[in-house]
Amino acid sequence: MAKLKSAYFCQNCGYNSPKWLGRCPSCSEWNTLVEEVIAKDEPEKGNWRFSTSGGPRPTSKPKLISEIDKTEKYRIITEDHELNRVLGGGLVPGSLTLIGGEPGIGKSTLMLQIALSLKDYIVLYVSGEESEQQIKMRAERIPFENPRCYVLTETATDQIFKQIELIEPDIVVIDSIQTLVSPLIESGAGSVSQVKECAAEIMRFAKESDVPVVMIGHITKDGSLAGPKVLEHMVDTVLQFEGDQFMTYRILRTTKNRFGNASELGIYEMLSNGLRQVSNPSEILISERNVHLSGIAIAAMIEGNRPLQIEIQSLVSTANYGTPQRSSNGFDPRRLQMLLAVLEKRGGFRLGTQDVFLNVAGGLKVEDPAIDLAVCVSVASSYEDLPVNKAYCFCAECGLGGEIRAVNRIEARISEAAKLGFEKIFIAKNNLKGINPKDFKIEIVALNKLEEVFSELFG
């Protein structure tokens, strides 16, 4: 008979307490501690923790660091180049990847599309949310066929590992981690103890078998991954699938990656037959304009290793109702306030009585300081109602003294602007060190002050 033990777990952060508390001492949230029953039992023989020969698994022995083979493991290269980019080059054997996103954003479609595209590998797609018929209906819309892709509708981890021993897949996809149930825990599916135990079992399986596992996770109403925070610490890679479900474009963003850059992103377009890879993101981040409009400027930014051209849109109008409004979409509001103060103090623009609205086209959230100059030019263009030449782009950080500061990787930004057909790019004069302007098929304008930029643009 198993010995039962009860504890109270915070459903927000995973903190456990022997007694109920109104407020979680860890995350300070109220009424989040829920009682869960924990069963402590020895695993049965035949469980995945034992080798297929029936004996216990071999124990690992310590090695000197000089004796460890440092040869890099191969990566599983998928047909999805955007996914390869955010993973750092492909799936690493034995890695554990967690992908989260809002309901209906396309997480299951993306992972089923990846599973069907890996024709050279045996793939097991485990679903605890949909039936086999529902998965088949979705698979018929995707233009990929994989005769070695298996579908399993199961939530019990012991049954899942039994099927894994029979099929011996090369890749496992689990949809989703919140639906799995371990027989070693008495609490219901989705609880903190269940999520922790199921994730721990999957992690041990992945590390011992060198089989990469991709798990889909739910998110909370504030946008963070549901379940205990320890879940994100256990996995090797955390991906966030973002986008407005009423728009067609989706962004796959890396928030943690032990095998690559943690600031990469991939862009997709949701179509009726699945997700299309967007190899040139500037096509969606820059709108087609047949007429010159004021308040629009193009910025040359870098996200991860990828240079992008994004469109900054501004609207400056007279404030008729008390305190002027300062609103931004995709840009830090506090940084916008700082740049507006610089424009008023150093540029002579009277923005204290103006409403200012700023938008980054395409729904992208930008943190690169290199778009500061484009933001200032966009606001000044709207204030003066003078359009900026659509063949110009901007790449520099702005200081509090109105100076233009240099940014990193300027060669990649200039090359991307030249490739997209821009005729002139405005950068900081300090960025000219180490580069030859004649090597680029674009005119480079290097300046020191915001006033020089405005004189060049508006006269």
Image (cartoon, rainbow, N blue to C red):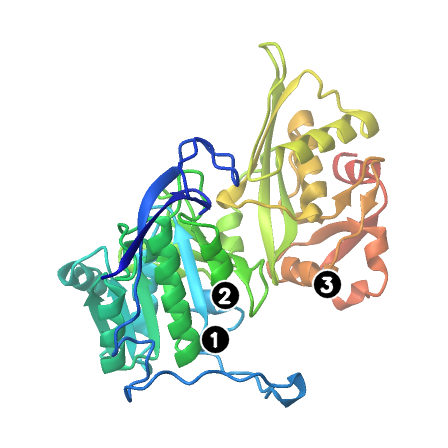
Residue in view at x 71 percent, y 18 percent: 352
Out of 150 and 28, give the one closest to the viewer.
28
403 to the left or right of 312: right
Q: Earlier in the sequence, mark 1 or mark 3?
A: 1
Amino acid type for the residue under numbered disc 3: Glu
Using the numbered discs, state the Cα–Cα distance from disc 1 to disc 3 in whole angstroms: 31 Å
Q: For mark 3, give the secondary structure.
A: helix
Look at the picture and state if 330 lies above or below 209. Answer: above
Q: Is label 1 or label 3 in front?
A: 1
Q: What's the mark number on residue 92? A: 1
- Residue 359 x/y as whole percent: 55, 36
447 to the left or right of 69: right
The residue carrying pointer 1 sits among few (fewer than 14), some (14 to 19) or many (20 or more) residues within 10 Å by Cα, namely many
The residue carrying pointer 3 sits among few (fewer than 14), some (14 to 19) or many (20 or more) residues within 10 Å by Cα, namely some
Badges 2 and 3: C-beta atoms under 8 Å apart?
Answer: no
Residue 376 appears in which quarter of the rendering? top right
- Residue 452 x/y as whole percent: 83, 39
Badges 2 and 1: C-beta atoms under 8 Å apart?
Answer: yes
Q: Which residue is mark 2?
A: 236
- Residue 309 x/y as whole percent: 60, 52
The residue carrying pointer 2 sits among few (fewer than 14), some (14 to 19) or many (20 or more) residues within 10 Å by Cα, namely some
Amino acid type for the residue under numbered disc 1: Val
Residue at the farthest left position: 133
Out of 192 and 291, give the one closest to the viewer.
192
Q: If the image is split into quadrants, where does the N terminus sit?
A: bottom left
Residue in view at x 81 percent, y 56 percent: 431
Q: Which residue is mark 3?
A: 411
